[in-house]
Amino acid sequence: MTKVVTLAHYYTTPEIQELADKVGDSLELSLYARDAQADVIVFAGVRFMAETAKILNPQTKVVLPDTGSTCSLVTMTDITKLQKWREEHADYVHVAYVNSSAEHKALADWIVTSRNVDDIIAHLYADGKKVIYSPDRNMGAYLNFEYGYDMPLWEAVCEVHDKFNQQALDEAYASVSGAKFLIAHPESPLPVLHGADYIGSTSQMLNWVRDFDGAADAVIFVATEDGILYNMKKARPDLDLRQAPIYSGCQCNSCPYMKLNSLDAVRAAQAGTGGVEIDYLTPELIELARKPIDRMLEFSQRYYK
């Protein structure tokens, strides 16, 4: 009997998260994919996530429910231009965000997620290294500002997080008479992050909400994709949790690529009658892309001790 394991990112719909064997952020799902004892991994997320699962578990069949599930950080990055940029900074350590294609990862020295990026880059600077960062410009700008780095940055953004803006937040804040908080993902623009009470990965924001012990009537605005609110509200139904608006009255910032993972598409992938198999990565590409991921995973073991 074929063993199928279904992984889902926090940004997928509630129905898919309930169907999945594991729900998590990029780091959690990478670790789970690496160690999964399965014949087939159905990855309800976007293509770079399914590619990462295949890189970490190359003997397992990996299926993406919808072939269109990509990411703007991937589509905004020309690999030929990235390679030239890398060559222009030959004496730098190239740190690449996990939200990147397999070809992109193969040009990196380290892969990072939003949960471990602060620690890994701090580790490299403490070791006297110079760093270039790709592909997320917003996250790189935040790191440069927060820690005084001078990393050259690649110019790509997450089209979802890049829509958050201070004007819409100010309008939302004006409607709240009591205590209010903003928690934000570091893919958001720097002006938004400047005003955040907490900055972290999806899992870190979820933990912040779980542990919140402030005023019972506080309003907590969440600057990330709206899928995470499902788990936040499950964890803390007593709290007033709202997605940060992108314009007046709009708590509507969804990733169109994540939402291509319909319930029917996931079920068809599980049944072996739908989806696209990640079968195009060559052994050479897998080997090159895996090295920087393994560095990250070895470093990140500290989070699970």
Image (cartoon, rainbow, N blue to C red):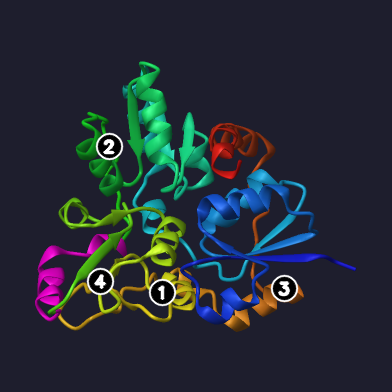
Task: Report the residue marked by disc 3.
Answer: 270
> Which amino acid type corresponds to the residue marked 4 in the rendered image?
Ala
Q: Are marks 1 and 3 in contact (CB under 8 Å)?
A: no
Residue 280 visible: no
Q: CA distance from mark 4 to mark 1?
A: 11 Å
Q: Looking at the picture, which amino acid does disc 2 mark? A: Leu
Q: Residue at x 59, y 55 (%)?
A: 29
- Amino acid type of the residue tagged 3 in the rendering: Gln
Q: In the rendered structure, which segment of residues is drawn in magenta?
A: 160-176
**Dot 4 or dot 3, earlier in sequence:** 4
Indicate whether residue 40 is drawn in magenta: no
Task: Please tell me whether mark 2 or mark 1 is closer to you in this view.
Answer: 1
Q: Vertical placement of 15 versus 8: above or below?
A: below
| Of the image marks 1 and 3, the number of the one nearer the N terminus | 1
Instruction: Give the mark, 2 or 4, whose residue is nearer the N terminus.
Output: 2
Q: Quarter of the image holding residue 257?
A: bottom left
Is disc 4 placed on a helix, strand or loop?
Answer: loop
Q: Which structural element holds mark 1?
A: helix
According to the picture, the residue beneath numbered tag 1 turns out to be 229
**Front-most of residues 279 and 225:** 225
Choose the circle earlier in sequence order: 2 or 1.
2
Residue at position x 33%, y 21% from top?
A: 130
Q: x and y percent of residue 127 in the render?
A: 40, 17
Residue 168 appears at what percent x and percent y? 14, 72
Question: Where does label 4 land, which residue?
Answer: 244
